[in-house]
Image (cartoon, rainbow, N blue to C red):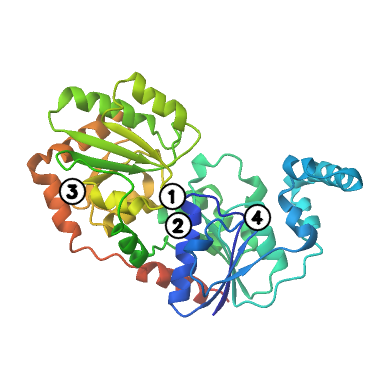
Amino acid sequence: MKILVVVPDTNVGGVTSSAVNFCNELTLRKNNVYFLDLSGEYKCDDRLRKSITRLVLEGKSKLWNLGLECVKGATGIKKLGLLLLGAFKKVTIRSGLWYDLIFSRFKKQEFFDVAIAFRQCAPCYSFVLKKVNAPKKIGFVHGELKYMGDVSSWKRYMESFDRIAYVSDAVKKEFVNAYPELKKNACTIYNMFDVDQISRMAMETPAVVFDRSKVNIVTVSRIDNGFKQTHWIVEICRRLKEQTTIPFHWYVLGDGPDFKSTVQLAKDCAVDDVLTFAGNQPNPYAIMKQCDFTVLTSRSESFGMVVIESFVLKKPVVVARYDALCEIMEGGKHGLIAEQNIDSLLQCVRHMLENKDGIKDRCTLFLKDVKINNDRAYQQFCNALRSVN
């Protein structure tokens, strides 16, 4: 099949990783894949397989995300024109008219068998629906409705897709319950993973020097004390230092809006000797591979990519419970599931750290026989296409 995948940008994050994995897997399954980053930046280019064709916007279509930075760099008549265009954008963007205008002169894309708007947002949905020739069109949703705020700017497009693919049954159920009219085109397509690449990268030299006399813990997450609850890690480390004699070190990989304040919090709580915020890492898998288990503190996840990546690397997990978690792991086998509070998460982390009742050993042994592949997710994708009239 000839498949086009469209994203608004390729900034670092779980949705971008998911898009890259999706495209790479479709290519491995002998599909002819085209990829369009509407921003034109292609920050993930080194991770996309070379056989994937990159597309770019042309002309005024490139101004779809017009902002002050574009205006600042212009002079004279061009600057005046951009200011007027920016004013028009401000007035029309909520209604969707802005995207109709800015993409209006863009030559409609050549024929594809399938066109996919991979991220839930108005520009992505609008472009795929109105500027691509394809008999089958799929829009993805990657987040839980209750944490998304106002979705009206892109929800208006959802009924026009042949299928809306939610990345877990839990996410699908929430949307359909809130908007029964979306049931008719709803389906589930799980996130895909480049297992070979994860395994290969895990064998590289890690950017961190580990003390093998300690139990090493890792969290891979955006540093966000609201949604990701990263500050919980600081408090858990503080309590662990008081409650256990097991030597440990916790590594947090990632950046985000609360990076500096959380690093300072760790210093204020005197846990910076056992807790390292390592920032964004080009190869987190090499670090995860060397750690004993993974902890995920998020309030919610639409699927849980870090959980699956840990399974690929045969590492047990401790996860704060969220709706979709039951679709990808079983507590006591893959790891431990905590409730959504610090006390419960602390207890589970301590049990794994101390290997209470051999829990870490049992989970590690169980994961040795767990095979991770994309067969189910790809079958979900094929089933979604077959159900389109």
Callout 4 secondary element: loop
Q: Quadrant of residue 273?
A: top left
The residue drawn where x is 40% and y is 52% is: 303
Q: Quadrant of residue 276?
A: top left
Q: Earlier in the sequence, mark 3 or mark 4?
A: 4
Number of on-image labels: 4
Q: CA distance from mark 3 to mark 1?
A: 22 Å
Tell me whether circle 3 and circle 4 mark residues in contact (CB < 8 Å).
Answer: no
The residue singled out by tag 1 in the image is: 302
The residue drawn where x is 77% and y is 70% is: 107
Callout 1 secondary element: loop
Q: Nearer the viewer, residue 243 or 342?
A: 243
The residue singled out by tag 4 in the image is: 39
Q: CA distance from mark 3 to mark 4?
A: 43 Å
Q: Position of residue 24 (x, y in %)?
A: 46, 69
Q: CA distance from mark 1 to mark 2?
A: 7 Å
The residue singled out by tag 3 in the image is: 332
The amino acid beneath tag 4 is Ser
Q: CA distance from mark 4 to mark 2?
A: 24 Å
The amino acid beneath tag 3 is Gly
Mark 3 or mark 4: which is in front?
A: 4
Q: Position of residue 388 (x, y in %)?
A: 55, 74
One can see residue 156 in this view: no
Eyeballing the image, is 229 above or below 196? Answer: above
Q: Earlier in the sequence, mark 1 or mark 4?
A: 4
Q: Earlier in the sequence, mark 2 or mark 3?
A: 2
Q: Earlier in the sequence, mark 3 or mark 1?
A: 1
The amino acid beneath tag 1 is Ser
Q: Position of residue 147 (x, y in %)?
A: 50, 40
**Quarter of the rendering occupied by the C terminus:** bottom right
The residue singled out by tag 2 in the image is: 167
